[in-house]
Amino acid sequence: MATVEQVRAAALRLPRTEEHLVRDRVKFRVGRIVYLALSRDEQTLGFAFPREERAALLAAEPDRYLPPEPADERYNWLRLRLAAVDGAELAEIIEDAWRMVVPKKVAAAVGLPPGPDLAELREAARVFAGYGPDRGWARWAAETAPAADLADPEHRAALHRWLNAWGCRIRYPRPGEPDLLADGLAAWWSRHGAGLPDPAGDTLAGLTDRQIEALAAAYGELHALPVGPTRTLGPTAAAKALYALRPAAVMPWDAAIAKRLHGSRDTAAFARHLRCGRAWARAVLAESGLPEAELPAALGRPGVPLAKVLDDHLYVSITAAG
């Protein structure tokens, strides 16, 4: 259970935050923009949150979150039951809310790496579009429609082909040899498939902390999956596989991106990467004022999720830049 003292401590450590008492309510703001507001009974906390993602989060965790008061529904706002989170979870929620209201240079000094703004995403989309159509993705999507299910051997084979199309170079078994990747994916799916985000509705911006931890655990096991006598699937292929399975919810990485942003490619680093993606997605949604389904097209990347637009930016600005 989080406390008012923890709210105050988490907020006031963030640059430019000021505490004010307004009509018997404690509020925290940057300049004139309020990003946190305690209820009068101090049982709930209102916080900045993209309104486009509000319905999904309320549906996913109704025990934690409450809709805004009617007067606040038009704003980027949500409410949290303090009794439903611990101090660490509270600190992440507060920092994400703060990032929505401060300049990018200010956010860069705290916690997660700073994310791109709309202009940077638009430029990365222009560059990435020059690489031509992604025929490998089109084939994967067609072979696994309407949603990937790794209990199906054909879908496991399709994932193997798609990973190799992206340069993962996972050897295909010779006749009579066991298919280590296919067998490993089937077992992994039986343990983690049901716990992955809903492919029909969950997005990167709307991921809950629990979903991020579940994805990180799934990544850690997938990373270590044997694909040969002396080789495992590895961190890049594991991240790409999770993206293939849940493209709206997972921002993947490669070795260069992981090293630059996190200095590691372990489970904790992948969880941090998803938290980065979530904060960045929420920030650009708030900047644009558009629904998440419309933003990629507005940036020049129609037909792809926002998670992929953010990954495109990282690829162009880090991997391709060398």
Image: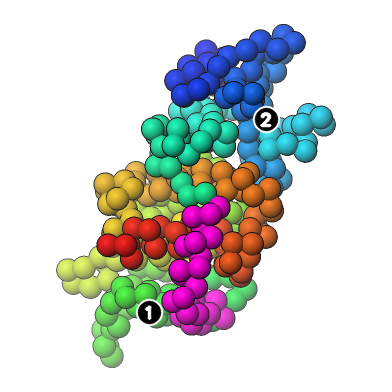
Reply above or below: 18 against 88.
above
Which residue is tagged 2?
79
Reading the chain from its start, which is encountered first: label 2 or label 1? 2
Mark 1 residue type: Ala
Q: Nearer the viewer, residue 293 or 100?
A: 100
The residue that disc 1 covers is 165
The furthest residue to the bottom: 175
Marks 2 and 1 sit apart, C-alpha to C-alpha, by 44 Å
Report helix, strand or loop for mark 1.
Answer: helix
User: Residue 89 or 114: which is nearer the viewer?
Assistant: 114
Q: Residue type at mark 2: give it.
A: Arg
Per the rendered image, the range of residues in magenta is 118-142
Nearest to the observer: residue 39 or residue 311? 311
Q: Quadrant of the N terminus?
A: top right
Residue sitting at x 29%, y 50%? 260
The C terminus appears in which quarter of the rendering?
bottom left
- Name the side, left or right, on which 132 lies relative to 109: right
- Residue 129 shown in magenta: yes
Q: Residue at x 63, y 44 (%)?
A: 286
Residue at x 27% of width, y 80% of height: 171
Q: Residue furthest right?
A: 70
Query: Disc 2, disc 1: CB below 8 Å?
Result: no
Residue 101, given in percent of the width and then of the height, sits at: 57, 33
